[in-house]
Image (tube, coloured by chain):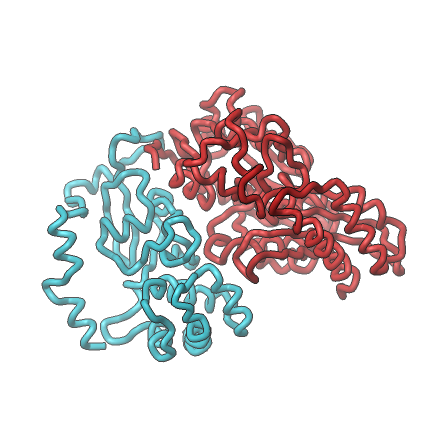
Chain colours: A cyan, B red
Amino acid sequence: MSDSSSSKQSAFDRRAFMAGAAGSALVPITARAAAAEARPPVAQDPALPVDVTLHVNGKEKRLRIDARTTVLDALRDHLKLTGSKKGCDHGQCGACTVLIGERRVVSCLTLALAAEGQEITTIEGLATDEHLHPMQQAFIDNDAFQCGYCTPGQIMSAIACVKEGHAGSEADIREYMSGNICRCAAYPNIVAAVKQAAPEIMKG
Amino acid sequence: MRPFSYQRATDPTSAVQALSAAAASTPLTKATAQPLAGGTTLIDLMKLDVMRPAAIVDINPLAQGWSAIELKGDEVLRLGALAKMSDVAAHAEIQRNYPVIADSLKLAASAQLRNMATLGGNVMQRTRCSYFRDVSYENCNKRNPGSGCAAMDGVNRMHAVLGASDQCIATYPGDFAQALIALDAVVEITGRSGIRTMPFAELHKAPGNTPDIETTLQPGELISAFSISGRWPRSVYLKARDRQSYEFALSSAAVALDVQDGTVRDARIALGGVATVPWRAREAEALLKGQAFDDGLAQRVADAAFAEARGRRHNSFKISLGKRVVARALQQAVTMEI
């Protein structure tokens, strides 16, 4: 794990370079704290951006975005948290699954504005510098992916599946993980990973 | 997605006010202001450009008052319209006394969508007709009144065999609504002039000549709760679909029975996946009442439920499938241990 945490902290990576080269999608927000507090409950002008404060992985993030922006696009395009994946963008594949509060939801059908003030947890918020989350480790141990595109959504969904008490049997895991599609069909290995991680997660 | 203005409702009055902008003659589905609850239908259809509201009124702040699950006294179940599908499905009292409700919710959508979607939004869910959802097909009487129906002579395997008109054969896609209509639920509606109630069976409108008008709700009206009288521990929701999980029904049945000493005292049957609206099979129910149940009776009841069904090129299989679903659901309900 020390390898991956050190690479995460390196000064230069592909994502940072691309975001910078494209003209930063991040909004200079420092001067806008007061405006964010003052957003009135009346309808806003759709032609103007809105100020939104999101709580992501324990940090407060202030954004100025188009009102149409989903949580998924806010994470990926504005916060450079590209772990959550855009698969179908219509709530059908589960690749964009994040936790809002304790609940797993599809971030592609959640407006960022509607998630304001709630705690959002993404795949980037699971590991500590020292340790992967037990579900992340279980996916590696059980070879629970091939291409990996669905994996962040699978892992977020699996953690909630366990905490909801729906990982008691293989049949339950399959039923309650059915909102996460894996086109590589790693399903048997995903079920095995969830089974492995469940006791450790329930222990807390 | 087209631009919209977003506002948060602070209380029911402000929500109703903000949603009342459209003229009373505007079909609800075309109203300029739309309520946002779970968003699982609305945001999806806005991305597809099927729904084009100019204003979104986020009613989630009303959840505190509108999401309770209450058993009042012994005999009335009241479900707040902003209760999440997953919370209602997981409620122990509902699983025990209303398994048809719990199962209709549990077998719908995915765990993520059930966590987001509310009961009120769920019954307002719009059809999955692929010609309705794809705006590149111009002829959809539901989207563009008078333009025709691409499904009539298109791929209509998923379409309705009951309640269709020569204007529209789109299937009502939900599951929970079948449980509500079977149990004679009452829907509570909050609007400009306060709260009104009506039988849930009067909420949805068959397509007829106006498939764009799907419900009897007016712009500015919100579903705030559902209530059900009596307990229905002997009830099931059976759903047949193309895959085992996370799929819309090809055919489903909500069945609730009151059986005493081998005789059926009361019977409720509703059909999903096969009709244009939540579909109550009253003629079929009548055959059961006062009778001793056996497999022959189940078959006659199932035949009666689909007596008026009319298949098209690709969906006629739903008639024989639907009959089997009804018969099996009845058998499961009769043999339940309660």
B73 over A180 or under it: above or below: above
Q: Going 61% across and 32% down the picture, which residue do you hit?
A: B207
From the viewer's perspective, tell me whether residue B331 is left or right of residue A128. Answer: right
Q: Quadrant of the N terminus of chain A?
A: bottom left
Image coords of residue B280 (percent x, y): 72, 42
Report the front residue among A22 and B104.
Answer: A22
Depth check: give the residue in front, A180 or B258.
A180
- Between residue A91 and residue B129, name the one nearer to us: B129
Q: Is residue A17 left or right of residue A95?
A: left
Q: In the displayed structure, would residue A195 be above or below residue B88?
A: below
**Quarter occupied by residue A65:** top left
The location of residue A171, given as percent across then percent down, is: 55, 71
Total of numbered circles in the picture?
A: 0
User: What residue lies at 59% left-to-right and 27% top-to-bottom?
Assistant: B210
**In the displayed structure, does residue B296 sit left or right of residue A30?**
right
The residue positioned 41% from the left and 71% from the top of the image is A186
Q: Position of residue A197 (x, y in %)?
A: 41, 76
Percent of width and height locating residue A85: 32, 57
Is residue A177 visible in the rendered image? The answer is yes
Decide if residue A144 is on the left or right side of residue B13. Answer: left
Residue at 18 percent across and 47 percent down: it is A26
Give the quarter of the image for residue B58: top left
Q: Is residue B80 visible?
A: no
